[in-house]
Amino acid sequence: MIQINRISLFFQKTLWRIDLNQLPRWKAVLFNALRIFLAVGRDIVDGQLNFRAMSLVYTTLLSMVPLLAVSFSVLKGFGVHNQIEPALLNLLAPLGDKGIEITEKIIGFVDNIKVGVMGAVGLGLLFYTVVALMQKIESAFNYTWHVQKNRPFSQRFSTYLSVVIVGPVLVFSALGITATVMSHSVVQQIAEIQPLGELIRIGTRLVPYMLIILAFTFVYSFIPNTKVRLKPAIIGAVVAGILWQSTHWAFATFVVSSTQYTAIYSAFATLILFMIWLYLVWLILLIGSSISFYCQNPTFLTIERQKLHLSARMKEQLALRVMHLIGKKYYENQQGWSATNLAEKLNMPMDRISQVLDALEENGLLTQNCDDEPVYLPAKPLDTTLALDALNAVRSAGEGHLLSPKRLPEQPAISTLLEKIESCRYSTLENYTLKDLALEKMSLHQKGA
């Protein structure tokens, strides 16, 4: 009993307090992996990953045929459209004969979609369904990355097209190239030479794993609305790929031994098993995304999932630092800062930086250009805009008709105190502009200097 209590104490408290920098390299890696495992397990138990995976199942059922129709049209131009059916068969292989039946139905639906006779409205709805699916996927991945804001429409459109069009082309082209290379006469002759033949056979078995890891890495790098470094994306993809193959085998075993479900649910059994498999697929993808997040952001590895809120002091600090960085780039005639770049520079989560940027933009201090990844530029002349305006922008962020100081009952003593505070702030900063801040002029009373 004492030993069990010690183990429980280690996992609940001791593990999270250990300074990994003081440990040997191998032990630090082991403990960090254990922290990530427990953090992801905690997120699953909390229910949000399960909920989002189930939500994606419903959206996938509605959007799978339109998505495949769009991909089929693109892949046809590259001559690799015939790979869609084998890929679907491989995806649904754990369902056994039911997977073949579902694949035939889906391919039949895709073949029935005639883009030329759909008309503008039908074509628009087709693309809307695909974009809606991608937006739902982005929202789920953003949750795992603690990002609360989706991409703007223009950036969303280009990113989604990259995933929907470029992704399948790369994957199916890789499959075609692999098949061509392996069937080449030279490769066949080399395969007869040992031990090269054994190495080729091992490599052939590893190709599906490598393609899955490559596809997952692509998804983890481009879907979340934040900058994901390559190494965390690969780590998450490797773990998700291993889970994928393990679940693939386990679910196939389950389907073979679940003949009683067919007896109970009759024709609905195929649909139920299909939905369960889709749920497991999405859950694995979200687990891999969570692993990538914790690898890139180890400070979030705590016993409880962190919910970050900016204090008033942090909002003011970030507002001034953001205006300083943007103003400095402006006066140096250099490329502006994107939200991602600012988050990296200031070592802050993307969603918290976005909160400050939105407040500054709503108050007319910043504006965005129309680049694929928009950068922020001053919306007003910096030499006539006070630094105090930036502070006021974040102080008043979130106020509205229902949350305005004007709704509070009048109390003369408090009103007098607040007026004195505001007067002191203004008298101190009345001559200090955002230009002074950008050029790092330290004196607060040197306007015109």
Image (cartoon, rainbow, N blue to C red):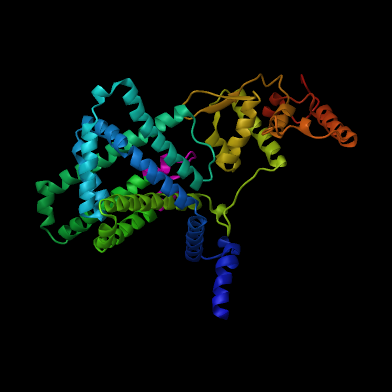
In this view, 160 is above or below 95: above
Q: Quadrant of residue 165?
A: top left
In this view, 360 is above or below 277: above
Q: Is residue 306 one of those drawn in magenta?
A: no
Q: Residue 399 at x, y = what percent?
A: 69, 32
Q: Quadrant of residue 243?
A: bottom left
The residue furthest bottom is: 1
The magenta stretch is: 218-237
Q: Quadrant of the C terminus?
A: top right
Camera-side residue of 62 and 196? 62
Camera-side residue of 333 and 357? 357
Q: Is residue 234 one of those drawn in magenta?
A: yes
Residue sitting at x 65%, y 30%? 323
Residue sitting at x 15%, y 58%? 197
362 sits left or right of 190 in the view: right
Q: Can residue 306 be seen at all in this image of the molecule?
A: yes
Q: Quadrant of the N terminus?
A: bottom right
163 sits left or right of 138 in the view: left
Q: Residue 167 at x, y = what percent?
A: 32, 38
Q: Can residue 228 be seen at all in this image of the molecule?
A: no
Which SS does the magenta portion mostly show?
A: helix
Q: How many marks?
A: 0
Q: Residue 49 at x, y = what percent?
A: 47, 51
In this view, 193 is above or below 330: below
